């Protein structure tokens, strides 16, 4: 596979700042708003967004959680690998809250669909919005679209988008892997 960098550290930082200011512009006072990172890879993005929002606003005036969707996925029984859920990190009800789901890459939409199913176990949100770092256009299996997008990329089915974070021992970079 050929690898091409589509976002380097500086570009990634600028993109994350833009997403934060877009959230501030659209959501206003964050009253009854919760940011929820989707396990496994969306949590790195959601934690970074949370840190930047606190730095920009000088406070955390929103709820924050991390959602494990392992048992809500439509493919969780297909493999031989045993799924071990991560620790539950939502200590609030989502009832009547505006939820911003956060994930690194939007591809088929199946992960987001699973997250929507999982969220209903915590209550009925007033509204759910989606923030993604990378939107892989033209590849949905379900009718899902993001409200906040860091970058949209045109990809083929056999292409891959890989997001690396310093928090998991890599460096901040986004690669597109293609079979040419």
Image (cartoon, rainbow, N blue to C red):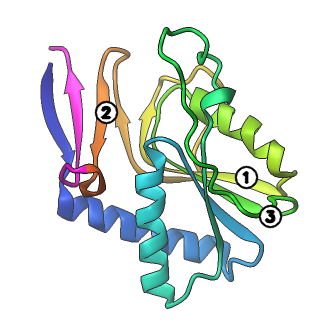
- Tell me which label, 1 or 2, sits earlier in the chain: 1
Q: Is residue 20 above or below residue 98?
A: below
Provide the secondary structure element on which disc 1 rests: strand
Q: Residue at x 19, y 15 (%)?
A: 179
- Tell me which label, 3 or 1, sits earlier in the chain: 3
Task: Give the residue number, with chain letter if any, for mark 1.
Answer: 128
> Callout 2: few (<14), some (14-19), or many (20+) C-alpha neighbours within 10 Å?
many
Q: CA distance from mark 1 to mark 2?
A: 25 Å
Where's residue 159, x and y in %?
29, 21
In the image, taking residue 178 as reference, residue 139 lies left or right, namely right
Task: Give the residue number, with chain letter if any, for mark 3.
Answer: 97
Where's residue 19, x and y in %?
45, 65
> Callout 1: few (<14), some (14-19), or many (20+) C-alpha neighbours within 10 Å?
some
Provide the secondary structure element on which disc 3 rests: loop
**Does residue 25 show up magenta in the picture?**
no
The part of the image, by quadrant, that contains residue 86 is top right
Marks 1 & 2, CB-CB < 8 Å contact: no
Quarter of the picture containing the C terminus is top left
Q: Over which residues does the magenta segment extend?
A: 169-180
In the image, taking residue 61 as reference, residue 170 lies left or right, namely left
Q: CA distance from mark 2 to mark 3?
A: 31 Å
What number is the disc on residue 161? Answer: 2
Which of these two is toward me, 87 or 160? Answer: 87
Residue 167 seen by the camera: yes
Quarter of the picture containing the N terminus is top left
In the image, taking residue 124 as reference, residue 22 lies left or right, namely left
Where's residue 93, x and y in %?
81, 60
Tag in front: 3 or 1: 3
**Does residue 176 show up magenta in the picture?**
yes
Q: Residue at x 29, y 57 (%)?
A: 167
Q: Is residue 46 above or below residue 132?
A: below
Which of these two is toward me, 111 or 78? Answer: 78
């Amino acid at each position: 596979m050929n690898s091409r960098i589509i976002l380097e550290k500086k570009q990634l930082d600028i993109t994350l700042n833009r997403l934060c200011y877009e959230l501030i512009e659209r959501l206003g006072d964050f009253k009854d708003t919760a940011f929820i990172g989707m396990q496994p890879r969306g949590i790195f993005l959601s934690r970074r967004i949370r840190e930047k929002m606190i730095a920009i606003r000088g406070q955390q005036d929103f709820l924050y959680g991390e959602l494990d969707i392992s048992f809500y996925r439509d493919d969780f029984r297909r493999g031989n690998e045993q799924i071990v859920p991560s620790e539950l990190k939502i200590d609030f009800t989502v009832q009547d809250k505006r939820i911003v789901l956060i994930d690194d890459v939007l591809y088929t939409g199946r992960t987001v669909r699973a997250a929507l199913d999982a969220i209903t176990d915590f209550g009925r949100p007033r509204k759910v919005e989606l923030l993604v770092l990378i939107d892989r256009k033209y590849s949905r299996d379900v009718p899902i679209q993001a409200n906040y997008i860091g970058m949209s990329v045109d990809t083929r089915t056999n292409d891959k988008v890989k997001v690396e974070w310093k928090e998991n021992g890599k460096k901040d970079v986004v690669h597109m892997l293609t079979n040419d």
